[in-house]
Image (spheres, helix red, strand yellow):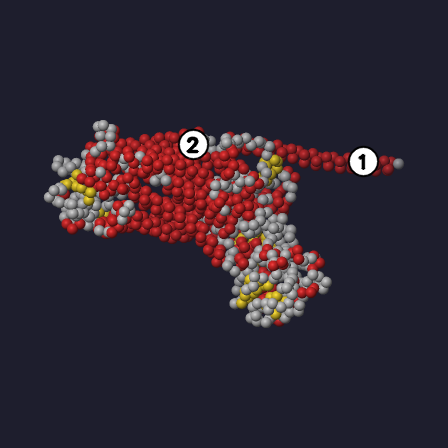
Amino acid sequence: MSDLSRLTGKIEDATLIEIRPHSLYDEDNNGYHPQEFELGDYPHSQPDPSEPPTPFIPHPDGPWSDRVEPCVSLVPEVKGRHGSCESLHSSRPSVRTQCSGSDHSDGSGSDHGLTVNCLSTMGRKRALFLKYRSRVDKNQQSKDSVFFRDGKRRIDFVLSYTDDRAGDNKKQERRKEYEANLQKAGLELETEDKSESEDGKTYFVKIHAPWEVLATYADVLKIKVPFKANDIPNNRDIPMDWLFTPFRLPDRIMNPEPDYFTSSFNKEKIDFFLIDDKETFFPPSVRNRITGSCPAVLLRHILVDDTVDTVSCPDACLQCRYWKPAKDLNSDSERFHLYKHWARFHSFFKEQPLNLIRKYYGEKIGIYFAWLGFYTEMLFFAAVVGVICFLYGLFTFDDNEWSKDICGEIGGSIVMCPLCDKKCGYWKLNSTCNSSWQSHMFDNVGTVFFAIFMGIWVTLFLEFWKRRQARLEYEWDLVDFEEEQQQLQRRPEYETKCTARRLNTVTQVMEPYLPVTSKCARTFLSGATVLFWIALIIACIIGVIAYRLAVYAAFASIIKDSPTKKIELVGSLITPQLATSVTASCINFIIIMILNLMYERVAIWITDMEIPKTHLEYENKLTVKMFLFQFVNYYSSCFYVAFFKGKFVGYPGDYIYMFGKLRNEECDPGGCLIELTTQLVIVMVGKQVWGNIQEALVPWLMNWWGSRKARNHPESLYSRWEQDHDLQNFGHLGLFYEYLEMVIQFGFITLFVASFPLAPLLALMNNIIEVRVDAWKFTTQFRRPVAAKAHSIGAWQEILNGVAVLSVVTNAFIVSFTSDMIPRLAHLYVYSGNQTMNNYINQSLSVFNISHFQEWNKPDPDENPNWFDSSVITTCRWGYRDYRNPPGVDQYKHTMRFWHILAAKLAFIIIMEHVVFLVKFFVAWIIPDVPSEVKARIKRERYLVQEYLHNYEVTLKMHNYNGCFLIYINCSLLQRETLTKIEV
């Protein structure tokens, strides 16, 4: 193909090629520079939209008069319906059409001519479609617009539906009735025929809300609008503010609107408000919310009357392609600014333009990004302290006396009992040298400090978020917002599925309701389903535990003679414990992902089955079900490693078995904390990586495939509503999944943070990416959702509070029972005698006589190492802190030291919990939920509202009184004049 040509479409299996010179080419104007044409070349009259397009033929003396050539019609039967060759002259240059069967230009004719070679196989419908796509709009309006054809009325909402099968008149009648009801509500409609769409099947109904509709709904919804400029000075001086300059965005982006005092809109008092231009008085999110609520309400009543089917899906109209601003001067470019300053990853260190997000997407999405950004900022402090604690463990290797004992002569002389029956032989304690050093990085004094710190950090995070939320409530006019106005509206599904009716004692209107018996049955079935799935998760966890018990012996046999043992650096790290732990964690992660995908569908199904009455009730029910399931699904394996593994093992000669065959696994001599760290890292990091790939890649691939044909068209042919329609739909549960992902992450970094101080750092890095990925999704991959209001994060606030309280308990138990901190401190200050860690390992490992092994416990002779001689070695140690008596008197019973350490562990739990809870309550009490500055502004605004309304009413009454008084005087003068004339 020549470099002077470009692909504009396909006719069945053939390619339609448009040949043009470079001097006339402009992609955004359908291939031609508008400067090349004169106004005289086009009709100035505005045709009636109901009439078919009139073909345009250039003036004989116009600039294109020397390029007009006769053409041969492709499809003769379309003549008379503007399908002839003359109708092709409606495009800016003249077009020479030849049905020569060739797919390229013959190169003859003028250099500035435009030749389109067509194929004779073009069908009638496709010919009409391409004709409409190639011509200039009859009203000279580009499809790169957010206005009706008249260029004045803004498109506030778009409904789309595909062409039904021929003869399906029932759906057409319902659709007509639905559109008629929209018009009765005051909305103005304009339909784009399916021939104008890319696929030739989709109709687009553009909706414009005139001022009367906007004012009426703003009055009903109590939307706050400005009535006076804010006169309270902003005294929030930040120390060393210049340090934050690189992180700030331009003020026009951060504050796209001036600061005003606002009051609920009243249609009867329009003069009270600051209305400069009615077309721009309501911001885009408000217009979107108002216009989107009209079809939803009307559709609900139509569904109840069984007069319409689900025929249309709302597509909020995009403003412009996200990578460039809108060319229409009358169109805003919020979406472009959001992409430029918010959605691109190189802005990851910049603040978020929350006011612009709220203006374009509404308060509900804005509050989510405000919470996510605040959570990420607070994670920075937790990550810094976590890194310091990790570095403390890293730099105190030399002080780790017990690891030196394990790796030195003491560890080389201690013979350990077999870790499994038959297939595991005796082993030396120094084989766990590397794992003991690794464990020290996370199991040290800094761990205790970090666990206490995170308990206080959680409280500070929640309390400071309340203050931030209160400030946003004021700035976004949500102080007096009543969620019932929006959320407590009945769901359409509730009205369609509830056939019973009863009288509402308040409204005196017959309303649908769900009988008590049906409600109880549905609730019982829903609860039983949730319990079944939780039991299924527990069963899967038990299966993973059985896997760990079953394969340990196999790994021990394989790794013993494996060539990997000879690899430098890495060979010594590959142990049966590590192999078992890593493979079990990976299998557990795969099971978690599979169960998660399955349960999402089940949770939505059982929630729909319960038929919640309102949207708020629906979200709360689904939130409880999903979080309860996700809690058990993601955290159960960590709870097992932290609190159950190695705690119910027994002792050599009297081991405890699962299912009577599988011997319970023991912890490593260095403790189970390193295994908990491994489990936490695999599940947490795996979930975050998988979630980001899924969030970014899946919508992009679906959009790429769905718009593979249309995306090559210039924007003048690829309309705004088609661009939006080709994107993915952001469902009403879209934000629910975003919150759920972050709350699960919040649980990982709080519930088990004592085992892995670097968890906040991993969460911080993930969230920095998450903010930009979510922003990129909203601006480029999803249709603009219908704006909605929300003054808080809803039920997630209570869930976060519950996780925060539980985290104090779990971390206290991890420090006490999972780590070796308490036994080491007890040895250091009580049992050592000289406050050193000397002989700690030797005193903490119990002794067992080899001759007391049962036949089924005794290892096979060929499994024992070469250095083992049963005639010389008569005892072994088991590798966990059990503190039992040696063989002899009261053999294998717990010593008094065991009970002292157990009491110390319980005492530590009680002391840590009480200290952290007291600090939490004190911090929550001392930090007010609402800043004093915000309280002052709220009081000032309420005072001004009352004062201004009073003055407005007085002025209005005086005006009416003066009018009546003047009328009375005029009437009196007229009466006196009449009487005087009569007397004369």
Q: Residue at x 63, y 39 (%)?
A: 274
Of all residues, the one furthest to the left in this rendering is: 871
Of residues 975 and 238, the one drawn nearer to the viewer in this rendering:
238
Element on which disc 1 rests:
helix
Q: Tell me how far mark 1 sits from mark 2, CA to CA.
A: 74 Å
How many labels were placed on the picture?
2
Q: Quadrant of residue 125?
A: bottom right
Q: Amino acid at mark 2?
A: Ala
For the C terminus, the quadrant is top right
Q: Which residue is mark 2?
A: 924
x and y, in percent, of residue 289 in the image: 55, 47
Q: Position of residue 180 (x, y in %)?
A: 59, 55
Mark in the foreground, 1 or 2: 2
In which quadrant of the rendered image does the N terminus lie? bottom right
| Left or right of residue 336, residue 603 in this image | left
Crowd class of label 1 (few under 14; some 14 to 19; many from 20; radius 10 Å): few
Rendering coords of residue 783 (x, y %): 52, 51
Up-down relation of residue 818 to residue 536 (above or below): above
Vertical side of 121 occupied by 193: above or below: above
**Mark 1 residue type:** Leu
- State left or right for residue 202 relative to residue 412: right
Q: In the image as oriented, which residue stretches furthest toward the top?
A: 834
Q: Residues within 10 Å of mark 2 (few under 14, many from 20)?
A: some
Query: Residue placed at 44% from the left, 50% from the top?
Result: 695
Q: Is residue 31 left or right of residue 346?
A: right
Label 2 SS: helix
- The image position of residue 520, as x and y in percent, is 40, 48
Q: Earlier in the sequence, mark 1 or mark 2?
A: 2
Q: Is residue 647 visible?
A: no
Residue 446 seen in render: yes
Specify the label residue 389 is tagged with. none
Q: Provide the residue designation for mark 1.
A: 973
